[in-house]
Image (tube, rainbow, N blue to C red):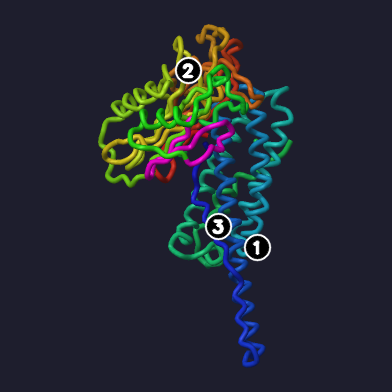
């Protein structure tokens, strides 16, 4: 899942204060000016949040480049920086119209995008030189500071102001940006709280249900009541992209597949209270037992995100010590009673099937970046953007204070994907 942000884009109506026949021209002019200021303020707010979002994406991709060694992956990331920088330039230009202190940031992001575009064109053939890699790392540090400066400006908005006023003040959080960037000009010659592959592979035809028999509505209702207790009432058919029955019991709802009678989705919106005090290992064991009772067997917890009043756990099917990320089931646990308040099994239902035997080369041949502190190595199968599955090695570890998940082709041992863990404002871990 992508990282949640407080995208508070303020939409303000233009106040046209017309006082009919009693309005004098000065009063009408003043009212119009007030309306225009509100409208411009809304545009500044929108530009600010869009800039912050794209700068965060640029920072994330530059951080990934620090551990990406495969040239194809480096090109993909460099092109991503170029794309995000191109979009960010337009929004930063809107902000610079009120305060010329921001112009150095505009120049820097524009040049950074162009530089990454230049590198992307040559990286697969020539690779990145040590000097180019070091320069990208220094740019990453500048973007990180730039994000901090923009975030600081947002504190004024959180206090009830707006960016239009913030960037117009004589002293504001963006004043020092040019000092950060001065030496960085480019010389020319890319959750719910979710873990890796939380979107899974979804080709819209369920492999898992292909050979299953269809249940009557009454039989599906009995499944809902058996699995979750209480009386459920049929309310209609679901709209999950597959045929399901929808049943409701108070604040609880469940969708049961017409074929096979499996729980595709369960939600309990009943009020919960208190912090979860139960140990994560115990919660994981209880959730795994529930999934087993629902017919989702051999599920391994692959990701957990803890908040004060809720825990989100992702389970993936595991067989012969291979984790199958396409076969994912998500569980939410809430409240002091540590009750399961959510189950989402769509990825598993779409993708689980008998698979061929994959070949894994000796992982001793995997090469990681100098300074990368390896923590885990896992054989896995991951979804691809071409709607297929690929056997891979997953290596997690630390590099320069960041946690990464790096994926290598199981046979060639070529690096094929990098994911970085981000700590978000709600104290939950996101992976992007």
Is 247 magenta? The answer is yes
The 10 Å Cα crowd at callout 3, few under 14, some 14 to 19, many 20 or more, is some
Residue 179 makes an appearance in the image: yes
Return the disc, 1 or 3, that comes first in the chain's sequence.
3
In the depicted view, which residue is nearer to us: 172 or 304? 304
Distance of mark 1 from mark 2, alpha carbons?
52 Å
Residue on which disc 2 sits? 323
Q: Residue 210: where, in percent of width, then height?
A: 58, 19
Name the residue at the bottom extreme. Answer: 22
Q: Secondary structure at mark 2?
A: strand
Q: Position of residue 264 (x, y in %)?
A: 48, 30
Mark yes or no: residue 195 visible: no
Residue denoted by label 1: 97
Q: Tag 3, which secondary structure? A: loop
| Circle number at residue 142 | none
Of residues 49 and 141, the one drawn nearer to the viewer in this rendering: 49
Total count of labels: 3
Between disc 1 and disc 2, the foreground one is 2
Give the residue pinned by disc 3.
9
Quarter of the image holding residue 46?
bottom right
**257 left or right, relative to 125:** left
Which residue occupies 59% across, 17% down?
390
Residue range highlighted in magenta: 235-256
Decide: is 351 above or below 337: above
């Amino acid at each position: 899942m992508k990282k949640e942000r407080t995208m508070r884009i303020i939409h303000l109506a233009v106040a046209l204060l017309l006082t009919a026949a009693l309005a004098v021209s000065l009063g009408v002019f003043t009212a119009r000016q007030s309306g225009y200021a509100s409208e411009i303020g809304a545009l500044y707010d929108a530009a600010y949040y869009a800039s912050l979002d794209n700068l965060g994406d640029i920072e994330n991709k530059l951080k990934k480049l620090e551990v990406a060694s495969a040239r194809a992956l480096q090109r993909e990331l460099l092109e991503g920086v170029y794309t995000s920088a191109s979009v960010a330039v337009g929004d930063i230009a809107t902000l610079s119209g009120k305060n010329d202190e921001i112009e150095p940031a505009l120049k820097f992001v524009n040049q950074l995008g162009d530089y990454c575009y230049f590198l992307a064109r040559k990286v697969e053939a020539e690779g990145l030189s040590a000097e180019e890699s070091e320069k990208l790392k220094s740019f990453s540090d500048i973007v990180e500071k730039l994000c901090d400066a923009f975030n600081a400006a947002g504190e004024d908005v959180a206090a009830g102001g707006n960016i239009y006023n913030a960037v117009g003040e004589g002293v504001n959080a963006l004043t020092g940006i040019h000092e950060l960037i001065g030496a960085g000009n480019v010389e020319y010659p890319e959750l719910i709280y979710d873990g890796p592959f939380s979107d899974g592979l979804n080709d819209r035809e369920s492999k898992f249900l292909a050979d299953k028999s269809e249940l009557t509505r009454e039989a599906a209702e009995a499944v809902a009541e058996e699995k979750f207790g209480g009386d459920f009432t049929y309310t209609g058919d679901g709209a999950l992209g597959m045929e399901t029955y929808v049943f409701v019991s108070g604040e609880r709802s469940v969708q049961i597949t017409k074929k096979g009678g499996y729980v595709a989705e369960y939600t309990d919106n009943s009020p919960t209270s208190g912090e979860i005090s139960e140990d994560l290992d115990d919660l994981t064991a209880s959730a795994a037992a529930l999934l087993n009772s629902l017919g989702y067997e051999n599920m391994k917890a692959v990701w957990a995100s803890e908040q004060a009043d809720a825990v989100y756990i992702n389970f993936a099917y595991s067989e012969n010590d291979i984790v199958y990320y396409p076969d994912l089931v998500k569980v939410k646990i809430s409240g002091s009673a540590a009750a399961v308040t959510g189950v989402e099994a769509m990825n598993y239902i779409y993708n689980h099937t008998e698979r061929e035997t994959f070949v894994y080369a000796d992982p001793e041949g995997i090469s990681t970046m100098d300074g990368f502190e390896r923590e885990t190595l896992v054989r896995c199968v991951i979804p691809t953007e071409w709607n297929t599955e690929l056997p891979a090695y997953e290596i997690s570890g630390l590099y320069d204070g960041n946690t990464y998940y790096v994926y290598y082709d199981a046979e060639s041992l070529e690096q094929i994907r990098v994911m970085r863990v981000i700590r978000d404002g709600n104290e939950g871990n996101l992976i992007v």
